[in-house]
Image: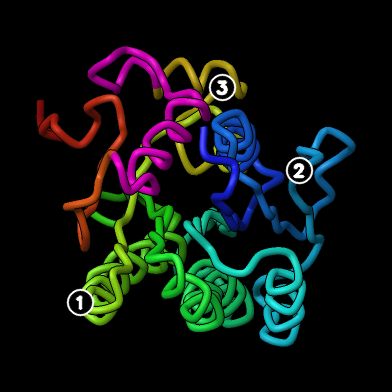
Amino acid sequence: MNTSKTLLITGAAGGIGRATVALFAARGWHVIGVDRAPFGADFPASGRFIQADISEPKEMETIFEQVRLFAPCLNALVNNAALQIAKPLVETTVEEWDAVMASNLRSVFLGVKLAYPLLKICGGAVVNVSSVHAVQTSANIAAYAASKGGLLALTRAMAIEFARDNIRVNAILPGAVDTPMLRAGLGRGHVGHGDIQERLDNLARKTVNGRIGRPEEIAHAIYFLADEEQSSFMTGQALIVDGGATARLSTE
């Protein structure tokens, strides 16, 4: 294990975020976690948790003031935080649309700008957590899908611009993963009928693997893209981790 490596991850207190924090810490990385929600006492002692709202530009600047005090450079930046609004497009307000874009897309733009000098020193990697909704989506989730599609395009653009500085930029596109966000989305009724467990079971049946994903599985894919020893020749790519969901024709 290389204890000198440092990770910054947003959305650290969520399902995928917590699994990613735990995995990187177990592999010897120093982890800086950011989330608007509290993480709890179990955040790794060798790291630092910053409670902040990444949708606010001024708070982003404050975050990176603390990051610079903690580490001389960043080996990886994982843009994982996201906001999901599950409602019909015509019922989505301008304020809701803007909130989704601020959390899911603008925060990545600002975060990468602020992280760039630290990533350049280490020759680090950026992993953007997009979604299968960037390539195939469903009804009543338009703002989220648009933000994740934009994040995929931004990933390619950043990969081109940052290659000369030995900074790799890739995206991971999770499918249905058992997280609080997924359960909240199902609870708001944009997929299927019945109680939450029935809707989870329905999602599982529609997946080629016959189940939904676990946060730990996404964390391992994130680690693969962040670790220069495993993915050193990958940049500008989209890694879909969805149990085969996007491989199946919708008309089947």
Numbered disc 3: secondary structure? loop
Tell me which corner region of the image, top left, top right, bottom left or bottom right, holds residue 44: top right
**Left or right relative to 128: residue 181:** right
Query: Which quadrant is home to the C terminus?
Result: top left
Q: Nearer the viewer, residue 50 or 164?
A: 164
Mark 1 falls on what kind of element? helix
Question: Which label's residue is closer to the chain start, 2 or 1?
Answer: 2
Res 156 → quadrant: bottom left
Mark drawn on residue 25: none
Pair 3/2: label in front: 2
Which segment did they paint magenta?
A: 204-229
Residue 194: numbered disc: 3
Q: Is residue 36 visible?
A: yes
**Compared to 13, does 160 lie above or below?**
below
Number of other residues with Cα within 10 Å of mark 2, as a class: few under 14, some 14 to 19, many 20 or more = few
Whether residue 184 is visible to the viewer of this picture, yes or no, is no
Instruction: Look at label 3 and name its amino acid.
Output: Gly
Question: Residue at horizontal 57%, vertical 42%?
Answer: 185
Does residue 41 lie above or below 86 as drawn?
above
Q: Residue 58: where, in percent of width, then height? A: 73, 87
In the foreground, 206 or 229: 229
* Residue 209 inside the magenta-drawn segment: yes
Residue 215 placement (x, y as % from top left): 52, 30
Side of 107 where 18 appears, left or right: right
Q: In the picture provided, is 26 more to the left or to the right than 150?
A: right
